[in-house]
Image: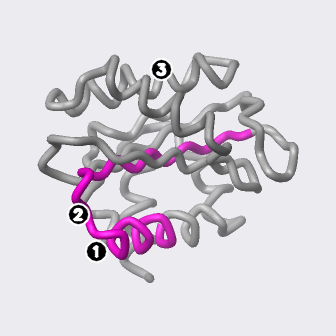
Amino acid sequence: MKISECLEKNSVFPQLVSTTKPDVLRELSEKVAEAVPRLNVQRLNETLVEREGLCSTAIDSGVAIPHIKLLDIPDITIAFARSETGVDFDSLDGEKTYFFAVLITPENCPTETRITLLARISRILGQNDVRSKLVASKEASDIYNLLIEEDEKL
């Protein structure tokens, strides 16, 4: 499965304004629920907070991939957001997090599918040149196109 099958243009948010982890999770929940009306903002936020409580989804190089499973959603959803100032998101490397790729899958989604999507996202955002281009991109459409182009290369 490719990212392009799950990421919509209206689910790319070039500027998060929140500066703390709880606020980022709330802002991500609100933005994603607005873009994908079938998602309940409160349930989404609660599940993201619960997931982060288990272990931070911030890896390194300024990247976090919050990923959750939800009951009763029909499709996989990916959203992407960027913070220009960075957020302390309890990253493995102790650095600020600037890029957030949210993966929401149905509860019954095969584990292999989730792992494939997480790996694709990680490979794309793990590239220095991609992150540099994401920083330089100001419009959601530019970010969306870059992510889709990079996904096609894998």
Measure the alpha-carbon separation of dots 2 and 3. 24 Å
Mark 2: few/some/many CA within 10 Å (<14, 14-19, 20+): few
In the picture, the disc for residue 5 is: 2
Quick one: 118 or 17, which is closer to the camera? 118
- Local secondary structure at mark 1: loop
Residue 92, given in percent of the width and then of the height, sits at 80, 51
Quadrant where the N terminus is found in the figure: bottom left
Residue 118 counted in the magenta span: yes
Q: Is residue 42 left or right of residue 60?
A: left
Q: Is residue 112 left or right of residue 49?
A: left
Q: Is residue 99 above or below residue 146?
A: above
Residue 13 position by quadrant: top left
Residue 52, given in percent of the width and then of the height, sits at 59, 37
Q: Which residues are magenta?
A: 97-120
Residue 139, given in percent of the width and then of the height, sits at 44, 38
**Which badge, 1 or 3, comes first in the chain's sequence?**
1
For marks 2 and 1, give the one nearer the viewer. 1
- Residue indicated by mark 1: 1
Q: Is residue 7 above or below residue 82?
A: below
What's the amino acid at mark 1?
Met
What's the amino acid at mark 3?
Glu
- Residue indicated by mark 3: 27
The reply to whether discs 2 and 1 touch (Cβ–Cβ < 8 Å) is: yes
Mark 3: few/some/many CA within 10 Å (<14, 14-19, 20+): some
Measure the alpha-carbon separation of dots 2 and 1. 7 Å
Q: Is residue 72 above or below residue 149?
A: above
In the picture, the disc for residue 32 is: none
Q: What residue sits 14% from the left and 31% below the top? A: 38
**Which badge, 2 or 3, comes first in the chain's sequence?**
2
What's the amino acid at mark 2?
Glu
